[in-house]
Amino acid sequence: MKKSFVFLLLALALIVIVSPGIVGKLAEQSMDENLDWAASESRDIKITSQGFDRGWFSSAGQHRIELSGGDIRDVIDVVFQDNGYSGIPALIIDTRIDHGLVPVSSMGREKGSLAPGLGSAISTLQLEFDGGDTIELPGTIYSTVGLTGALQSNLVIEPGTFNDGAETVQWGNVDALITMSASSSTVDFAGQIDEIVFASPDDELVLGQISFDGEQALTPFGFSVGDAEVLIESIAFPTDIGDFDSGPLKFTSTASLDDDLVTARTTFEIGTVPIGALGSSSLGFDMSFIDVDAASLSRISAVIDDIDSYADDDDLRLAVEDDLRTLFARGFELRVDRLDVALPSGTFSARLDATVEPTDIGDFVMTSVLLALDANMELSVPVELFDMAATLNPEFNAAVGLGFLRLEGNEYRMRAEFSDGLLTVNGAPMPGIIPGLQ
């Protein structure tokens, strides 16, 4: 019994005292692998290590995150230029890692833990501007590196206020949890942001509670699949015609990969949104792409992301032409199961189901799409809404005269079908409507 007790003490000593130095290197490598993989997920993010000082029980490191391109960078660039700044600031993350299979040294700080793993870390944030000036950002990131190398990070921000002259940003609690695994190429995320208020002497924008969660997995085609959901409780701001008060807003997306075909669905709902003279309304949208060629879609998306690098429309067309041919030749289905705008006068709604049948890529030309397309569309417009549109633009009346819209009760309706190159609207064939087809 005594010998077993000695062996147990020796094992504990190895875990607590010897393991930190060995595990520290593994923790460093694991964190860098996860950050490198996270950067590879987006063409617009650049992550670089600014150094890593590895000790026996704890280590310190710094990483620099920059937006190298994309729509988000363009928006931020405009905002900063409008406010007198030049360039895009970089995010600097300073991290201390307490390592060891049992990270004893972490117990001397907030949220320290003896849970087994490769390390337990705490990070603080800064923004670095052109010229080297920095400002501290609120919040702390608490991270753990699991035994399998998975990196779990918890961003915690206490309620606070930031003032820039007469402008103020006020926020509530922020709590977000992100788990990344480079080995399985997955990211899980969930979190909640309490009310945020952007205020100036002439304006105020109030965002209600924001919550989000989801899981994503990187595919061999360079994009991720999985599920995501974002819920915004409310959005409110003043306008020239009165206060705009909308919400809740809910966005969901799901995508899956079957061999080399991707299927994706997006939904969007707004419980209440004011639309000027039309009154208060609600909106619902549900769209799906089914069995789309993943490789072609990935390359087309890459071209669109880099659209500014193409000199003219001809260069852009040449860049996507072959992939568009492949995408259409393999066929796919597009469905809009719901597009509803509920108004006091009635509900504007639209439905669409379009299938492009597979064709021989060797004989494929772009006009083949029209012969391979089978589609059905339904549209309904409340009479009051149509009359308002026709008052603003009398040309809308031509849609009724030509038979595209037919009055049924309190709605104008359209039922359109397209098959074998022929368009039929409300039961009447419409030859010659689509160029190139008779």
Image: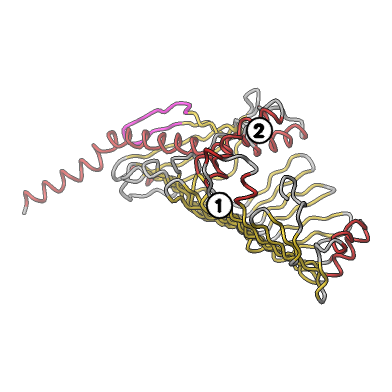
Q: Quadrant of residue 101?
A: top left
Residue corresponding to mark 1: 357
Q: In the image, what residue type sits under mark 2?
A: Arg
Give the residues drawn in magenta, as a range: 49-61
Looking at the image, residue 403 lies above or below residue 182: below
Q: Earlier in the sequence, mark 1 or mark 2?
A: 2
Give the percent coordinates (x, y) of residue 219: 45, 43
Q: Residue furthest front?
A: 438
Residue corresponding to mark 2: 317
**Which one is in front in this view, the residue at disc 1 or the one at disc 2?**
1
In whole angstroms, how far apart are the C-alphas of marks 1 and 2? 23 Å
Q: Quadrant of residue 347?
A: bottom right
Give the percent coordinates (x, y) of residue 390: 90, 61
Q: Which is more toward the observer, 344 or 368?
A: 368
How would you rate the neighbour count of disc 2 (Cα within 10 Å): few for under 14, some for 14-19, many for 20 or more? few
Give the percent coordinates (x, y) of residue 290: 54, 54
Q: Is residue 82 left or right of residue 229?
A: right
Q: Residue at x 29, y 33 (%)?
A: 21
Query: Was residue 196 drawn as part of the magenta stretch in this picture?
Result: no
